[in-house]
Amino acid sequence: MGIMVIGIWYWCTDQVIVQRALAAKNVTHAKAGTILAGYLKLLPMYLIIIPGMISRVLFPDEVACVDPEVCKEVCGTEVGCSNIAYSKLVLELMPIGVRGLMVAVMMAALMSSLTSIFNSGSTIFTMDIWRRIRRHATNTELMIVGRVFIVVLLAISILWIPIVQSSQSGQLFIYIQSLQSYFAPPIFICFVMGVAWRRVNEKGAFWGLVCGCAMGVTRMILDIIYPAPPCGEPETRPPIVYKVHYLYYNCMVAVVSCVVTTVISLLTEEPPAERVIGTTYSTRGYTSSSKEEIREDNRDDAEEMTPMNVKDVKEVIDDISDTPEKSLPKWRQGIYWFCGYNPAERQSLPDSDEMIRSIAEKPRWRKFVLINMILVTGVAFFLMGLYW
């Protein structure tokens, strides 16, 4: 149950994954890319878990070390060296040419994941937070703020490394899963209830997120303050930490978030019908005579959230373009250079009509994608039953 919550949160709502679907050419491409990811997700059992087991058997004194002093000497941490299992297998068994290729592959995969995470974090901060602080921010300002925020994320990531090394017995995968378990449930509940039940409103979703995240932060702080003791030493952690597995705690957070969201939504005003048409399961494909009225309301909301109207932005761009770069202060020239922005280059705003994409699908490819969806789902259920 807890794994299901994490899976739906990550693969259906996480910005790192969703941004790939949003970048698709059309709906069919988005579906096909998702199904291809599902096929690839069947491989970790044979590409990650089994090689890790092999590495543990081949290098019992290093990968499977138990003595804290030995582990400290092997991998620099006293709580375990399981994180070096895959790299140890590659560096010790593969020939020189293939070894370098595999190291390059691992580094490329790491950089791809980091860039996706930093890009997603920067997008969320810039578009959802900074635009509310400065409603008339120009595209140049948003770009600079986004890149500066990435630098801040890098600094926080580097400072967080010692905590990662000492948490969850030094096992990086378990640490990631536990951290996701603390914060995924409220987001999972917010999205699922928002799609499944039209009575959910903004206040209910907000307080459900707040209560769920508060419980997650509490458990995360307890895990940091009370790390797992080494093998052979008595247990000194609070019962809520060592008796309640993080996946069980995951379910508890999900239940609390669901209850809070439901209660607050029922006690507050119901959202207007025109706001939920086409956004919930019960109103999918709904059409009414008030379509133009709904579209006008959405246009008003978009104009309210737009940093500046097109005319103002074009005037700002013209002013910046006409200003010689040499007349700018040195510190501003340095910021522009660091962010890759050249004020001498004229910027063009995309036409809003060009950004609209049809959601219509060709019947042939729609059936092809549907068949593959059924196949990958069937294979996934078969493997679950086989290894249960």
Image (cartoon, rainbow, N blue to C red):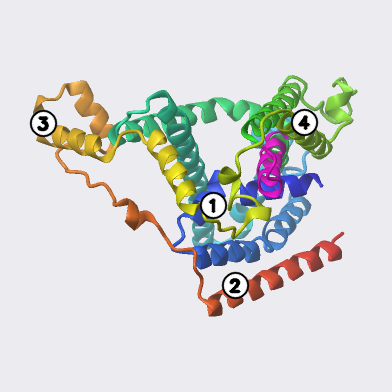
Label 1 sits on residue: 106
In-image side of 281 versus 32 (left or right): right
Question: Which kind of residue does numbered mark 4 sit on?
Answer: Val
- Give the alpha-carbon distance from disc 1 to disc 2, as whole Å: 31 Å
Label 4 sits on residue: 263
Q: Residues within 10 Å of mark 1 (few under 14, many from 20)?
A: few
Residue 379 sits above or below residue 24 on the image: below
- Give the alpha-carbon distance from disc 4 to disc 2, as whole Å: 39 Å
Residue 181: x and y, percent? 73, 38
- Give the alpha-carbon distance from disc 4 to disc 1, as whole Å: 47 Å
Residue 287: x and y, percent? 56, 58
Q: Residues within 10 Å of mark 3 (few under 14, many from 20)?
A: few
In-image side of 249 versus 46 (left or right): right
Residue that extends furthest to the bottom in the rendered view of this protein = 364
Label 3 sits on residue: 323
Image quadrant where residue 230 sits: top right
Mostly what secondary structure, the magenta segment?
A: helix
Question: Which kind of residue does numbered mark 3 sit on?
Answer: Thr
Which comes sooner in the sequence, label 4 or label 1? Answer: 1
Q: Which residues are magenta?
A: 182-200
Viewer-nearest of labels 3 and 4?
A: 4
Viewer-nearest residue: 155 or 57: 155
- Give the alpha-carbon distance from disc 2 to disc 3, as whole Å: 52 Å
Residue 310: x and y, percent? 26, 40
Residue sitting at x 66%, y 48%: 195
Q: Residues within 10 Å of mark 4 (few under 14, many from 20)?
A: some
Q: Residues within 10 Å of mark 2 (few under 14, many from 20)?
A: many
Residue sitting at x 64%, y 50%: 280
Residue 252 appears anywhere in the view:
yes
Question: Where residue 369 is drawn, which disc sits there?
Answer: 2
